[in-house]
Image (cartoon, rainbow, N blue to C red):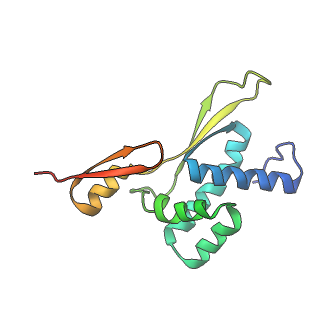
Amino acid sequence: MTTPKLGRKKEHRERTLRNLATSLILFEKVRTTEAKAKAITPMVERLISHALTGSLAARRSAKAVLFDMNAVAKLFEDVANRKGDRESGFVRITKLPVRPGDGSAMAQLELLYTPLEVVLQEKTGTSVKVRKTAKSAKTEEEVSE
């Protein structure tokens, strides 16, 4: 399988895909063109599969691909722990309407995994509500009686 050229030279294409992978890990949803979405999906799937091992070698290989250390930390601490019962298929591509400016086919990439409430409930054994504020996500534990 060959990687689509995306109208860029090799170095620019690699940087674009690495930047898109970093953004997808950090923000969990990204809007991009369909071609870029299809090109980035195998890379992100491979990163998440390696992160499930949790080894030092996997962390170093993720660090070589992702631009931001916060993305590497989130990949290993958050995304890998919240995979649920999935063994593959961590990325969903949803087609969107064409871009008005040039008519490019658009798509939305998003990570699929178990919601944070379910993971916290499994770990603590209590029901947990997650409340997102403007600055950070806060958790409120409610002991179920």
In the image, 89: left or right of 15? left
The N terminus - image quarter: bottom right
Q: Residue at x 68, y 38 (%)?
A: 32
Q: Residue at x 70, y 24 (%)?
A: 98
In the image, 145: left or right of 30? left
Instruction: Count every numbered label the image shows and give the total.
Output: 0
Q: Residue furthest left?
A: 145
Q: Position of residue 53 (x, y in %)?
A: 50, 72
Q: Residue at x 71, y 48 (%)?
A: 39
Q: Position of residue 23 (x, y in %)?
A: 64, 50
Q: Nearer the viewer, residue 48 or 19?
A: 19
The relative height of residue 79 versus residue 132 in the rendered view (above or below) is below
Q: Position of residue 79 (x, y in %)?
A: 49, 58
Q: Nearer the viewer, residue 46 or 24?
A: 24
Q: Position of residue 131 (x, y in %)?
A: 35, 44
Q: Residue furthest bottom?
A: 56
Q: Residue furthest right?
A: 9
Residue 2 visible in rendering: no
In the image, 8: left or right of 52? right
- Find residue 59 and report its image quarter: bottom right
Q: Residue at x 51, y 56 (%)?
A: 88
Q: Nearer the viewer, residue 31 or 73?
A: 73
The relative height of residue 122 versus residue 108 in the rendered view (above or below) is below
Residue 130 visible in rendering: yes
Q: Residue furthest top?
A: 100
